[in-house]
Image (cartoon, helix red, strand yellow):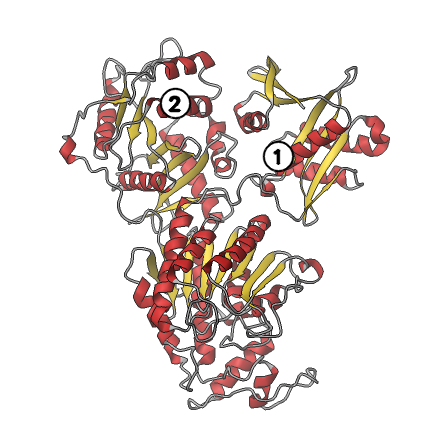
Amino acid sequence: MFRIRRIYDEVLPVNRAAIEQVKTIMRSRFPTVPQDEIDQLGRHLHDPFLQRFRTTLSVAQDARQRVLGFAFLLHEPTIRFCYLDWIATQVGKASGGVGGALYDRVRHEAFAFGAQALFFECLPDDPALCPREDILADNRARLRFYERYGARPIVGTDYETPYKPGQTCMPYLIFDGLDRTARPGRDFFRDVVRAILERKYAGYVPAEYVERVVGSITGDPVQLREFRYLKPTNVSAAISGHPCEKIALVFNDRHAIHHVHERGYVESPVRVRSILTEIAQGPLFEILPAATFPEKALASVHDVDFINFLRRTCADIQQDDPIYPYVFPVRNKARPPKDRSLLAGYFCIDTFTPITRHAYAAARGAANCTLTAAQEILKGRRMAYALVRPPGHHAERRAFGGFCYFNNCALAAQSLRGHGRVAILDIDYHHGNGQQDIFYDRPDVLTISIHGDPAFAYPYFSGFRDEIGTGEGAGFNLNLPLPETVDGDRYRKTLATALRHIAEFAPDFLVVALGLDTAKGDPTGTWSLTRNDFKLNGQLIGDLGIPVLVVQEGGYRTRTLGVNARYFFEGLSAAHCAASPQRQPANSPPAAHRIRHHVEPRDPQRVRRLAESTGFFSQPEVHVAEELVMERITKGPASGYHFVFVEVNGQTAGYACYGPVSMTASAFDLYWIVVAPASQGKGFGRLILLETERLIRQAGGATVYAEASGRPQYESTRAFYEHMGFHVASVLEDFYAPGDSKVTYSKTL
């Protein structure tokens, strides 16, 4: 048995381990591929400039996390096609259907991306093109396999023509129409071929070869080879089923032990049953059992004396006779009462959340479910859902209330925080005061809540716009209160604002506190969201494309609860599947960044650490970068070196060093431009370069020059310059070393 999952980045240890196994398979399967190209595989996932494609990696893994096979897919969103760069299984083992399953997943992903077609290369099965009998049988088997999907070689072009004398076995370019019967049009196919040859094979094929191949494409539509191995009636090109991995669904099957029978107490077991009945049988979810976590996990977000109080008080209740808080010692918190019935008010924020015999056990079960879902995210799964009750987002560090006892979202965020940055988005009708309280002074967890204004909505005492955090956490809490009457359109405008802040924060994980009490007719709310609104909200959240853990919070109209949940997850899953592999849209640096031009005493060390962190520069190069900053500090403007620094949350995200070219009237050199690995793919390089160009123009500069190595690992650097409007001014062969040319770029301002 195996499962296929998509790897978006190298944030998680399980992803890094999987990528290393992929590299091992590549070395054994493709021994002629240069080692530096294999070493760059991880960078392709978060750096689209490397080949100017968006890249996705899918791996097939067994229960022990061993990679059995992989597929590397390149997506070109402008031309709207996908290119299957690599697909391979382990050497020496029967594939067991791994290869076929991976190809099915690739087709699903390409279709979800909106690609018009999927292209890839396959060695020829014709002895006239490939006279090697030792591989012809395998070539025929592959082409026979792809014909099952209707995928066949393009014919009538010069694509198979060698670009060097003596080359043989030049590959076919295969076309898979992805459930579409139409053949590709000439202009579209020309754009596809040009993109493949100029990007995938940059540095290998000469420009004249590219023009020759593109010019040979004259048929409109392009011709495909006739079926050679199968009858057309045996082809199954349809794309069916759910394209993405399933959402991990974890729920506590003993939640019903906590059942308050008081009239009007709406937080009841039927809530979970209503949702589970609606979603469990569909294609979106995989139900997983909850693991058991030690009580000390609760202490990561709650005070120990509060945890002890709740456990002991629940244990003391012999019958279903709930304790309701009725005394609130706000005047003397330093002298807590001894009687546990009085302590209820000491640790509670309202009068209607009781302590029952099984409240502690049920709340522990909800916490276990949530932490299990978080573990699934850390195992590489992209979406998980903790369907839990009692809810948790009103539980503070040392207080319960609002039907909540332990804060499940905070527990999830704290668990994930050890592996990256976390954002919590609370979309319950009521303010998420619990997360706000727990993380209020921390900058590493962003907390956002969209809720009814505290002027009329519970919990009344928090959720105001001016509550933004304190100390180091200032600016990392955002409240978005809304009026009593809100429809779907109004809500989505506010949700879009919240999502922009999340994108700017650039988290590695997102925790969503899903409150369905924003629905029309909910007994605890006043808004009017419909099932379609929940689907659209799910799509907006899924468009972020980052791992998301959804934790169930409110929602009390049981007639529509399950349907609204299903629609939300349908939207979330569909959008998440089609989302760009980038964690954040390009050219969108955080709004809370700071640009400075002056040099500070600690900048030499900062620049050294920044250059070293990229793993891109040699130690002599790092030393030069540090020396330039020191010279600026020593000599000031007379040094001829000027700087642009960008900082986010007090950390250097990137910098540039530039200066006038001596003996020229208006020429400037761009000596360095470096972006920290954690800030790459977020538009900082563009931001720094544009600011540098502005300063150069202000100083009377008219032309900027930049240099780059011609080695393959500098392809992303060269692509960045070209994307920013630079043109190749000269190429000095073997300048740095044999085979290492110097490419000089210029840009007229």
What residue is rendered at 48% in x and 71% in y?
Answer: 526
Instruction: Give the left or right position of residue 708, taking residue 374 as reference.
Output: right
What residue is rendered at 41% in x and 59% in y?
Answer: 534
Total marks shown come to: 2
Q: Secondary structure at mark 1?
A: helix
Q: Callout 1: few (<14), some (14-19), or many (20+) C-alpha neighbours within 10 Å? A: some
Q: Nearer the viewer, residue 479 or 411?
A: 479
- Residue 256 image offset from top left, x and y in percent: 37, 77
Kindly identify which residue carries mark 2: 193
**Which quarter of the picture shows residue 679?**
top right
**Which quarter of the picture shows residue 455?**
bottom right
Q: Tell me the amino acid under the disc marked 1.
A: Arg
Where 381 sits versus 276, above or below?
Answer: above
Kindly identify which residue carries mark 1: 686
Q: Secondary structure at mark 2?
A: helix
Image marks 1 and 2: residues in contact by CB distance under 8 Å: no
Q: The C terminus is located in which quarter? A: top right
What residue is rendered at 55% in x and 79% in y?
Answer: 308
- Residue 192 image offset from top left, x and y in percent: 39, 25
Q: Is residue 742 visible?
A: no
